[in-house]
Amino acid sequence: MAWRYKQRWMADQLRKAVRFSPVVVLTGARQTGKSTLLREETPFKDWQYLNLDDLDLLSLAEKRPEELLALSNRLIVDEVQRSPNFLLAVKQAVDRDRTRRVVLSGSANLLLMKSVSETLAGRAVYFDLFPFSLGEEKEKAFTDWISRLPGPAFPKSLGPVEPVPEFSLFRGFLPPVTFLADEDEVAAWWQGYIRTYLERDLRDLSQISSLPDFRRLMGLLALRNGQILKQSELARDAGLSQPTTGRYINLLEISGLLVKLMPYSRNISKRIIKSPKAYWIDPGLVCALAGYRKIQGVAPSFKGPWFESLIFLNLLILARTVGGELFYFRTQGGKEREVDFILETANRVIAVEVKYADKIGMRDAENLRFLRDLLPNWGAGLIIYNGPEVKTLGENIHAVPWGMI
């Protein structure tokens, strides 16, 4: 498949942001497509573009930043984390001229966000770019289907729908890998990606005492993808101290590869779990970190969480696009109740269960009905599954095929 640019849903948010904010900060994991977006989307493709991976530009940013800023009053500076001192010059420039616009982009979130937050307070807005959503990969325009719930938001049936293609899960949704069609090429790409992250980005972020220990922890987190984060258990299994384990997890989070999903607790008096869940941002990355090099080798027990990671990615992108927040729900003590995801937008809750199954029955909606009766701000409940039909499972509770998100 030949490379071509696929439009990103976030582009509209960036366009709106530069209308009122002198500085826009775009971060995300390596290879999510930040540089490509800024070089392909209007109006940014017509702005002056600088990449501080260029050592001459980096030297100028450090020694004479005003010369770079004088190039244009519409400026994109990529890999800006390589020159934290440059940010002070940006602050001074936008303070002198509030019509100036600067987009700062980078992958190493720790250095970038710390410097930006301290130097550009009140002058910048922030965005995270994730891998492709299903819709972006298929080159579909963004549709806010969440706002149409409850009600006749979906057709009764999609007709013939294929089960979720395991190759897509194995391959993943980072833009460069979506153009590969061979299993061996995909496996090699992910191994190179992981090595690049370990060897390059970690040098930017922090000193890692043992790369093999860090890599082992990543593998253990991949096998626990979507589970409640139990740091003491991880430390024991990885043979690391708890402080070291916590620091390594934080590095993964701030570099944009791992997301801590917090529990939902608003308007709930029940006893609920307080610990976060941990999700990797891409199902292909999860698979590679878990050690799978072939689709046929993927264990059946891995496939449910694998599918859930795909839905997590898409709901996370949806939440960020519509200005909502994503959580999970789980009670503790007695009969535990759990709902995989809760999307809250405008004080309205959409609860989502994920089932790696091609058939869904009324019993599968039991926890959604429990939560519906518990929440005053209930909007709708969805079960996203691997079958072809839309089914009504109760008042404002529906089962929908994965392909509809």
Image (tube, rainbow, N blue to C red):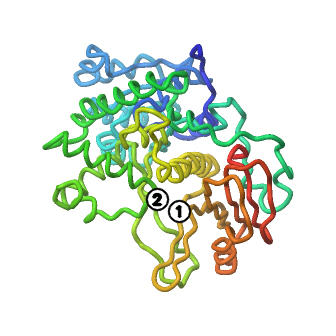
* Residue that numbered label 1 is attached to: 327
Nearer-the-camera pick, 346 or 242? 242
In this view, the residue in front, 313 or 217, is 217
Task: Determine whether, in the image, residue 18 is placed left or right of residue 53.
Answer: right
User: Image quadrant of residue 191?
Assistant: top left
- Amino acid carrying label 2: it is Leu
Instruction: Please tell me which of labels 2 and 1 falls first in the chain.
Output: 2
Q: Position of residue 167 (x, y in %)?
A: 56, 33
What residue is drawn where x is 58% and y is 67%? 339
Q: Position of residue 134 (x, y in %)?
A: 63, 38
Q: Position of residue 66 (x, y in %)?
A: 33, 23
Residue 344, above or below 204 = below
* Amino acid tagged 1: Phe
Q: 10 Å neighbourhood of mark 1: few (<14), some, or many (≥20)? A: many
Quadrant of the image containing the N terminus: top right
In the figure, 142 relative to 389: above or below?
A: above
Task: For marks 2 and 1, give the CA distance.
Answer: 6 Å
Q: Residues within 10 Å of mark 2 (few under 14, many from 20)?
A: many
Q: Which mark is residue 114?
A: none
**Does dot 2 land on a helix, a strand or a loop?**
strand
* Residue plotted at (33% across, 35% down): 87
Near-viewer residue (358 or 308): 358
> Quadrant of residue 291 in the image?
top left
Q: Position of residue 37 (x, y in %)?
A: 54, 26
Q: Which mark is residue 261?
A: 2
